[in-house]
Image (cartoon, rainbow, N blue to C red):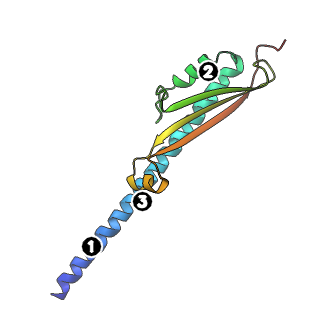
Amino acid sequence: MGEERERGQSLVEMATGLIFLLMMLAGIVDAGRALFARAALLDAAEEGALYGSYQPADVSGIESRIRDITDGPVDFSDLDAVKVSVSYAGNACAGHLLSVNVSYDFMITTPFVGTILGSQIFPLSASSESLILSPKCD
């Protein structure tokens, strides 16, 4: 009888430990997804800043260039989840800086991580600056 109780105790310990390990694994997967999404945001911001260095007055073109990026974990065409802002340090002409900021509401899939953070949505953002190359300033 004592041997059966020990097997039952081992089963309960294994089940408890397995739940903990699976929750850790799910959290690690979420963290990896967030890092991959952050890299996609950074690529998009750099693409917008590159386009803006030649066409700084075309803000809708800069945003369109960012939103046309299709591969990756972020759906840039979602206007509610992905926000794009463009700003200038000075005028929109050669020699001044252009800054592009892209922010995204990342959805956490692991239930307990969202509970710890207070929300299932984690804000991510990336920005890039570029020197405006044309047109020349008056």
In the picture shown, does residue 74 fall above or below 11?
Answer: above
Q: Are marks 1 and 2 in contact (CB under 8 Å)?
A: no
Left or right: where 43 falls relative to 111: right
How far apart marks 3 and 1 lie (CA) works out to 19 Å
**Quadrant showing the N terminus:** bottom left
Q: Hey, what amino acid is under mark 3? A: Met
**Residue at image mark 2:** 62
Q: Position of residue 80 (x, y in %)?
A: 48, 30
Dot 1, crowdedness within 10 Å: few (<14), some or many (≥20)?
few
**Residue at image mark 1:** 12
**Residue at image mark 3:** 24
In which image quadrant can residue 59 be found? top right
Left or right: where 115 falls relative to 51: left
Residue at image coords 69%, 16%: 57
Dot 2, crowdedness within 10 Å: few (<14), some or many (≥20)?
many
Q: Hey, what amino acid is under mark 2? A: Ile
Say what secondary structure mark 1 lies in. Answer: helix
